[in-house]
Amino acid sequence: MARKPAAARYTRNLDEEVLGKAYDSRLMGRLLVYMKPYRGTIAISLLLLLIGSLLQIAGPLLTRYAIDHYLTRPPDAAAFQGLTLVAFLYLGTIVFEMLFEFVQTFLMQRTGQQAMFDLRRDLMDKLQRLDLSYYDQNPVGRLLTRVTTDVDVLNELFSSGLVTIFGDLLMLSFVLIAMFQLSPGMTLMLLAVLPFVAGVMVIFRRTVQKSNRRIRTAVARINSFLQEYVSGMSVVQLFNREERARKDFDAINYDHMDAYKDAVIAYGWFYPVVEFLSMLSLALLLSWAGFGIQKGTITLGVLVAFLQYGLRFFRPIQDLSEKYNILQSAMSAAERIFKLLDTEPQITSAATPRDFPEGPLAIDFDHVWFAYKDEDWVLRDLSFRIEPGETIAVVGHTGAGKTTIISLLLRFYDIQRGSIRIGGVDLRDLRLEDLRRHFGVVLQDPYLFTGTVGGNIRLGTSSITDAGIEESARQVNLLDFIQTLPDGFASPVRERGSGFSTGQKQLISFARALAHNPRFLILDEATSSVDTETELRVREALDRMVTGRTSVIIAHRLSTIQRASRIFVMHKGQLRESGTHQQLLAMNGIYRKLYELQWAASPVQSKDPVAS
C-alpha cells in the first residue's frame, strides 16, 4: 500500500478548509454580544475616532489658508503673526490627533482582550462539559486551534478591525466632502481612477483569501502533529523515529510556508500598484491644476490642500482591502468557534433530577447493551448486582468490556438498552455532579497536573484539610516518600508528573481517591504498571481503602484480587463466570485458564500467592 504524504494524513478531521462568507450578520450579532458589556468604552473610543478624523481633515485646510493668505503675499509683521498662529494650530491638531489615537487604540485593544477573555472562558467551560465521545472524534490539536488561533483572529477583528473599518469609512467620507468643497472638478478627476483601484483590490482579496485558508489549515495540522508527537516523544526516541518524524513535520511545515508565499507575493504587488495609481492620479491633477492656477481659477493653497487630501484618500482604501480579509477570516473563525459552543453534550443531568440515595446502596446492571458505534456491541445483555460493601473484581481478556463497565457506571457514556441503578435509582435520573462525587477512581495511567503534590491530592476540593491529605498519604503508604521530598506536600509537580516514577504517581492517585472519601471505589488496572515492591505497598493500601466501601477492581494481575468478595469473568461483552477465587478455579473455565497462564506457567513463581 502506498504511503500517504504527511500533509494528507493530517487533513482528516480538520474543518479549517471551510471558508465562510465575508460577512455574516448572524455571526456578527453573536460576536457583538461579547462586546456588549463594554459598550461604554466602545462609545468613548468611537467618539475619539470621530474627533481624530476631523482633526486629520483640518490639517490641509490650515495649509490652504496659510498659503493663500500669508505665503502668497509680501512678507510683513501681520503675515508672520498669522503664519505663526496657523503653524501652532497645525501643531496642535497633530498633537491632539496623536493623543486621541493613542487613547482610542488603548481602549479598543483592552476591550478586545476583555471580550476574548470572556470567549475563551466560555470555550473552556464548554470543553469541560462535552462528552468523552466528542474527544474520541476530535483531535486535541484541533481544539487547541479553536481556543488559541481562532480566538486571536477574532481579537484582531475586535481590537482593530471593526473600529479601523469604521475609521477608514469616516476618513473617506470627510475627505470626499472636503475635496468637493475645494474643487468638484478635481474631485471627479481623482475618483476616475477608482475603478482600476477596485479591480486591483478584488484580485488581491481573492488571492489573499485562498492563501489565508491554506494558512489556517496548515496551522491546525501543525498543532495536531506537535501535540501527538510531543506527547509520544518517548516512543519516537525509543524506536529511533526522529528522522521520520522530522520528514513528516517538514512536509506539513512546507505547506505552511508555501501557503504564505502567495500572501507575500500579493502584499508585495498590491501596495505598489495602488501607490502607483494614486501617484498617477495626483500627477494628472497637478498638471491640470497648474493650468488652473495660471488662469486664476484655482489657488495654490487649494492645490496643495487637494494633494494632501489625495494622499489621505488612497490610504484608507488600502487599509479597507486588508481589513476585508481580517473580516473574512474572523467570520470563518467565528463559524468554527460557535460550532463548538453550539455543540451540546449528549449526557446531561435529568430535567428534574432525583437526590442521590442515602444509606447502603447496591449497584444493579439490568440487561445492559452498549456499543460505541451503531450496533457493534461491546456489552451484550449484561446483568449483575453488587451488594453494599462488596469488593468485586472484574477480569477478562483485552477487549472483553471491563473498562466499559466503569465508563458506564460513571456515565461517561449512555447505554442503548437496559438500565443501571444505584440504590434502585437509574443513573440517568441523577445529577452528574452528585453521581461522580461519590466515586473515587484510580486509572491505569495516573494523571498528575502541574502544581504541587498536595494540590494533586486535594485537586481543588476546599473541604479537604492538610491533615486529611497527610492521612490519606499515610494510608496508601505514600507518606514516607513525601517526607523525603525537600518541600514535602508543597513539592512542585511538572507537567504530567514528569520526574516521578509510575509507582509514585500511582500512589499519589490512590491518595487522591482516598482523600475525597468516596462511597464507591473503582480501580482500573491500577497496578499493571508498577514494580513488585510498589505492588505490595499498593496491596496493603487496598486492604485499608476497600474497608467499608463498595469497590470494583479491574485487574490483569490476579494477585490484586485474591481477597475480592466475588470475581466477574467477562468474555466478549458478556458475564461468563462469577464467584470467589476457589469457586472459579473449580469451574475449570475461563478463569482457570487465566490463572494457569499467569501463575502456574510462571517460571519465577514459587508458590500460589492467591491460595496463600
Image: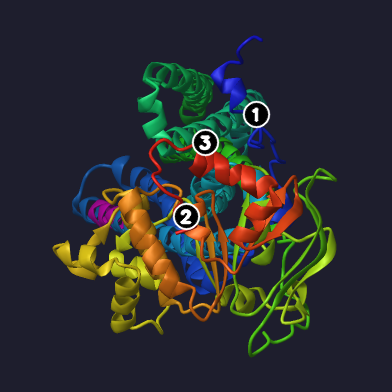
In the image, residue 434 sits, relative to residue 494, either above or below, namely: below
Disc with the residue nearer the chain's start (3 vs 2)? 3
Q: What crowding class fits label 2: few (fewer than 14 Cα within 10 Å), some (14-19), or many (20 or more)?
A: some
Q: What crowding class fits label 3: few (fewer than 14 Cα within 10 Å), some (14-19), or many (20 or more)?
A: many
Give the alpha-carbon distance from disc 1 to disc 3, as whole Å: 39 Å
Q: Which residues are magenta?
A: 82-91
Looking at the picture, how far across and down is residue 415, in whole percent? Answer: 79, 60
440 or 82: nearer the viewer: 440
Amino acid of disc 2? Ser
In the picture, measured across the screen, residue 52 lies left or right of residue 122, that is: left
40 or 448: nearer the viewer: 448
In the image, residue 39 sits, relative to residue 189, either above or below, namely: below
573 or 115: nearer the viewer: 573
User: Do tag 1 and tag 3 residues touch (Cβ < 8 Å)?
Assistant: no
Query: In percent of the image, x 49 and y 18: which residue is there?
Result: 251
SS type, badge 1: helix
Looking at the picture, how far across and down is residue 379, in whole percent? Answer: 77, 52
Disc with the residue nearer the chain's start (1 vs 3)? 1
Locate residue 20: give its quadrant: top right
SS type, badge 2: helix
> Is residue 227 visible from the viewing direction of this image?
yes
Q: What residue is disc 3 on?
A: 224
Amino acid of disc 3? Ser
Image quadrant occupied by the C terminus:
bottom left
Give the alpha-carbon distance from disc 2 to disc 1, as whole Å: 78 Å
In the image, residue 180 sits, relative to residue 352, either above or below, namely: above
Label 2 vs label 1, nearer the camera: 2
Q: What residue is disc 1 on?
A: 198
Query: In percent of the image, x 85 and y 64: which residue is there?
Result: 418
User: Do tag 3 and tag 2 residues touch (Cβ < 8 Å)?
Assistant: no
